[in-house]
Each structure stands twice: as C-alpha cells, then as structure tokens.
C-alpha cells in the first residue's frame, strides 16, 4: 500500500508519533533545566521540511511555539492549523525577504530574523497594528560572513529604529558557528549585547548546541531534528 502523503514533506504515516515527540521534549527540557540556572527557556519546535500534519502532533506533545524557515510553508501550515482550530505561536526563523512580509503579516507571532531597516519598515507598514508585531533582531556574532544578521555594532540602531516605528523589539537572535567551533563566544557576545540594550530575549541554540547556549543565557532555543528526526528532502 502506498503511504499516505501530504503537501510539503512526503509520507504522513512515518512522522514521529505524539508519544515519541513528547518523550524527546521531556528529555530536552530536563537537559535545559540542568544548565539554565532556574531561568525559563522557551522551546521553538522547528517543523521545516515536515508536512502540516506534524503541527497537530507537535502541539499534542506539549509544544506551543513552532518555527518555519520559508514564507510559503509557514502560510500553508498556519492556514491548516487554523482550519483545525489550532493556534500555535509561529516564529519565522529563516532568511526574510522584504517581498514575503506581506504574506506573513497576521500569521507570524515572532519575527526572529530581522536584520535591516527595510525589513523593519516593511513589517510596520504592512501591519494593521505595529505594536502587536514582536521582533527579534538577528545579529551575526560569528566570523562567518555568509551568515545572515546585522553586525553587532549595527544592532542598537536597528533596535532604536524598530521602536520608533512602534514595533515590539523583544530581543536578539543569532546562529552559532559551524565547523565544530566552540559556540560559547558567539553566544556570550549576543547575551552581552542584549544586556547592554536592555532586551529580555536571546534566541540562540539549536539541536547541536542548545545546551551551551542555555548555559550562557539563551531564553529561546530552536529545536528541529532532536524533536522530530532528520529533515525531509
């Protein structure tokens, strides 16, 4: 028999079960608690490459925040969730193009990858109520020039500009270094910058490096494969 399939990710029957996601989530929360020093740390379940059917399972397992990298996928999954009466907080965590903002306004709960003035302007202009738009400024705290994010010296200006537009600038976001480098220096730089700008949230840490991220001060981690298994092709 051909497995049941759904748009955007292939077979539905081989998705991780609610029980498996829940057990993995418990393990991740326990590991976070060990290094968090009593701080609350939010977990964004990254459903990139998985079909919309995973949304219901992820929420049933205890997640409340889900992250997507591509505008069209977030729109499709948000619409499917709404049709089922589900309302997770959707975090946009991929490279954000200005022409995609109009598709995402009204569906994104937290914009995590805003790294330039034009994006701040577009979000504010497209929003019915800019004060309801929650924004994290993405900062490149590594020496990898190919990574998205503003330079650390530009962050303060972006925060100030976003606030002048009425947007809710809640924190900073970064992606740790690749190639097996120690991620702590990049994460520590983001924490110090967030502290200096008096921003409460630091979104940093993924499946491979969330423990050191939490140890140095992350308040939001973005977890995909450790919850749901390898990405779909």
Image: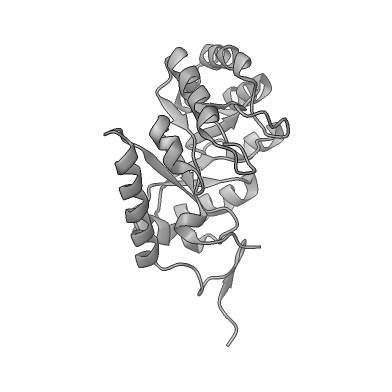
Q: Is residue 96 above or below residue 45?
A: above
Estimate the x, y position of residue 16 in percent, counting from the top left: 45, 67
Q: Residue furthest left?
A: 38
Give whichever of 95, 118 is nearer the camera: 95
Can see residue 190?
A: yes
Residue placed most toward the observer, 172 or 34: 34
Looking at the rendering, which quadrant does residue 154 occupy? top right
Q: Nearer the viewer, residue 179 or 106?
A: 179
Is residue 84 at all visible to an observer of this figure?
Answer: no
Location of residue 11 in the rendering, given as x and y in whole percent from the top left corner: 57, 72
Instruction: Determine whether, in the image, residue 222 is placed left or right of residue 179.
Output: left
Q: Quadrant of the N terminus?
A: bottom right
**Up-down: is 205 above or below 132?**
below
Quadrant containing the C terminus in the rendered view: bottom right
Q: Is residue 39 shown left or right of residue 135? A: left
Residue at the (63%, 34%) spot, across then down: 101
């Amino acid at each position: 028999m051909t497995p049941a399939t759904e748009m955007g990710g292939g077979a539905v029957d081989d998705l991780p079960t609610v029980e498996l996601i829940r057990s993995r989530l418990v393990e991740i929360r326990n590991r976070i608690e060990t290094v968090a020093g009593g701080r609350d740390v939010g977990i964004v379940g990254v459903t990139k490459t998985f079909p919309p059917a995973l949304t219901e399972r992820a929420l049933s397992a205890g997640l409340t925040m889900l992250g997507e990298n591509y505008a069209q996928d977030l729109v499709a999954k948000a619409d499917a969730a709404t049709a089922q009466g589900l309302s997770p907080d959707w975090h946009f965590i991929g490279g954000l193009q200005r022409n995609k903002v109009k598709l995402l306004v009204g569906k994104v709960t937290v914009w995590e990858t805003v790294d330039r003035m034009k994006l701040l302007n577009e979000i504010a202009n497209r929003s019915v109520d800019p004060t309801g738009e929650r924004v994290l400024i993405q900062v490149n705290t590594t020496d990898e020039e190919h990574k998205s994010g503003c330079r650390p010296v530009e962050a303060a200006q972006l925060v100030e500009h976003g606030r002048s537009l009425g947007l809710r600038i809640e924190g900073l976001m970064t992606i740790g270094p690749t190639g097996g480098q120690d991620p702590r220096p990049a994460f520590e730089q983001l924490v110090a910058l967030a502290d200096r700008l008096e921003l409460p949230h630091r979104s940093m840490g993924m499946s491979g490096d969330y423990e050191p991220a939490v140890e140095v001060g992350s308040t939001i981690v973005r977890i995909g494969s450790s919850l749901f298994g390898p990405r779909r092709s």
